[in-house]
Amino acid sequence: MKRVRTLACLCAFAAVQAVVAQADFKALLAKVDALVSFDGDFSAEYTVMQENPGVGTSVTTLAMFRRDKASKYLILILKPESDKGKGYLKIDGSLWLYDPVGRSFTFTSSQERFQNSNARNSDFTRSTLALDYDIAGSKREKLGKFDCWVLDLRANNNEVSFPKMRVWISDDNLVRKSEDYSLSGQLMRTTAIPTYQKVGDRFVPVDIYLVDALRGKTINGKFQSEKTKISVAKPSLAPVPDSVYSKAYLEKVGK
Amino acid sequence: MSFLPRRLLGALLAVSCLGPFLAAQDAAPPAEASPGGEEAPAPGETTIDDDMFSDAPDDVVAEVPTGTVLDELERGKLLAWSGSVSARALASAGWETVPWNGGALDGFTAGGGGSFASTLAFDVRPDGITRVHGAFTTEYPDFVPYAKELFLDYDLASVVYFRAGRQVLSWGAGRFFKDGNLVADSEEGAAVKAGVPVGRLGLSFVAIDRPAWHSGEAALREIAVGLMSDIAFGTTEFSLGGLYRAVEGGKAVATVKSSLWGFDLYGDAVLRLSTSYEPAYAALGGFYWDHVDPSIRLAGEYRFASSDFVDPGHAIALAVLFRKLGGSSVDAGVRWDHDFGSASGQVTPGLSLSPWRRVDVVIGLPFAYGSDMVIEYGDEEDPELFPGSAAVIIAVTVTVKF
């Protein structure tokens, strides 16, 4: 009887420990989210370099305006010439795509890839790891020069791009690497952010490297993954007029 | 095949008939690869391993930019030019009536032709509040320039954006059936549009004039005036627009767009009221699905129009496009248009590929059935006709863009 009581106590203790750990890591994720999200406006020029093995490399340059607090963003394609003027406007759950040739908007809830690259539209919005994911596992690991917490995350809703993630969070509360998985556990892509740039009291990646685990081409008997590099330049926290986050503005600045 | 709107059957050959309408509102259009566009270095890193993090530069404090992205957009550009020149050779062969029980050459006919066209566009943004944009086209044999677009923009204190001149306006959600686009006349005349930038709420006023509506100067009662408003709630957008012309009557369109299980769903309801005839109405419902891996696009629409509309009755249009087959440059697709009233229509399977830089080859196998054996293909606004029920049409186009 005494053994049973001891076992029950141990189980209860372990459960409490797990809850405490869950809460601690949730707090860590909240810190991570806060460091890369913006209460006011954020604007920058992004360059998306996409390498498709056997095909070539394409470059897309875009202007990004984000107001995370109001769940808004506007993206305007600046290059290449063939896509110039195309735009994305997102307000809460509503997403509009602007086609400057037909001068028309498509309203969609698409969560698909951005400009057919390895980036998702969600990569350009605020980080909501603490809100969208629960912690399924944790360990300490060295990632190059960074001492990291490695967290296994499980999505708690269907709105996210990836149902499972593994993230490497350095001790300065920044995500340095992540692996995105399907529900069945298939690795879909790997992301690396070796260096950040500090803007005000927030952080923005200098370069984001994405390696697609599924898309690529077999060349000389070896599978070569599609890769994307996203560079962020001219980051600014200067206020942006409300009128920028509108369909009319996309028509104004479009091609 | 005259029962269907020309703009509906105005499909480019086979697959290129699918491309424009499926790609025009593309959720994830492909970026231009370097072989045909800008030279670009590879992203550099081939794998993500510890070395990338061992050698990573330290985090930095971002330099304060001398000008923000918004400044650069608003600053204006004195003059930018762009354009294209294309030459197309086309061959067609087929049967006026498919000789199911006759000789293979019974009713066989063949032809060919070509076209040479160019577009020249300019964009002037002298400051952040004004802009002039023009796009002119010319075609062999007369090479008379035609102003496809020529308009002036004015930003009134970021409260109202004005656009005046010849411009493309678009209402409604239809990709195949465009009854809801009540403002399409703007492309053959001139219009003033005033748009109000108010976040999720869209509001715009339009006034349209077409030279074909009158002789001499336009009287006020000749001009069409309208208002379009739309608002989004979550993943559903509602739009309501109306257009009134004193000498003609009023038109209204209500549009709903939403998404479910990855499909974009939409519908238009159109009502026309006139002093000279009974109210006319049309409605359509459609869907669009875009799958990335593999790249498949699927679209379909059902349309009903009352007798006062062009091509009244029930009709459907369906299209599927498979892009970059097997990682190649080959796209393949099928488009089917069918009119239930006359039990006739057209099926157009086809392929498109880019075998060499700046060269596109399109192969279409259109098949018409029903009462009126004429195949329509080519430019959406001005389709070409093939007098038969089955054909092979091959077009080779060389395009230079600058």
Image (tube, rainbow, N blue to C red):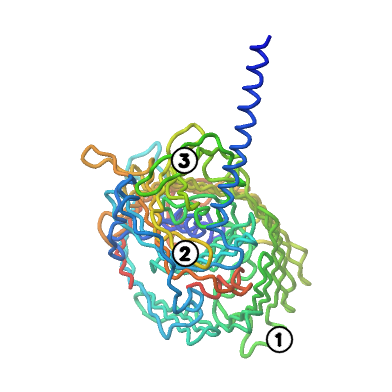
Residue A169 pos. (x, y %): 47, 47
Q: Are marks 2 and 3 on the same chain?
A: yes
Marks 2 and 1: CB-CB under 8 Å? no
Which of the two residues, A83 or A178, is positioned nearer the viewer here?
A178
The answer to whether residue A91 is seen in the rendering is yes
User: What's the mark number on residue A182?
Assistant: none
Query: Does residue A9 sit above or below B115 in this rendering?
Result: above
Relative to B166, is B249 on the left or the right? right
In this rendering, which labeled residue sits more in front, label 2 or label 1?
2
Chain letter for mark 1, please.
Answer: B
Name the kind of residue labelled 2 in the image: Lys
Element type at mark 3: strand
Residue under label 3:
A150
Element type at mark 2: strand
Residue B128 pos. (x, y %): 53, 83
Chain letter for mark 3, please.
Answer: A
Residue lying farthest front? A2
Q: Quadrant of residue A103?
A: bottom right
Name the kind of residue labelled 3 in the image: Val
Residue under label 1:
B220
Query: Does residue B221 sit above or below B60 in this rendering?
Result: below
Residue B348 pos. (x, y %): 44, 48
Residue B298 pos. (x, y %): 51, 46
Residue under label 2:
A198
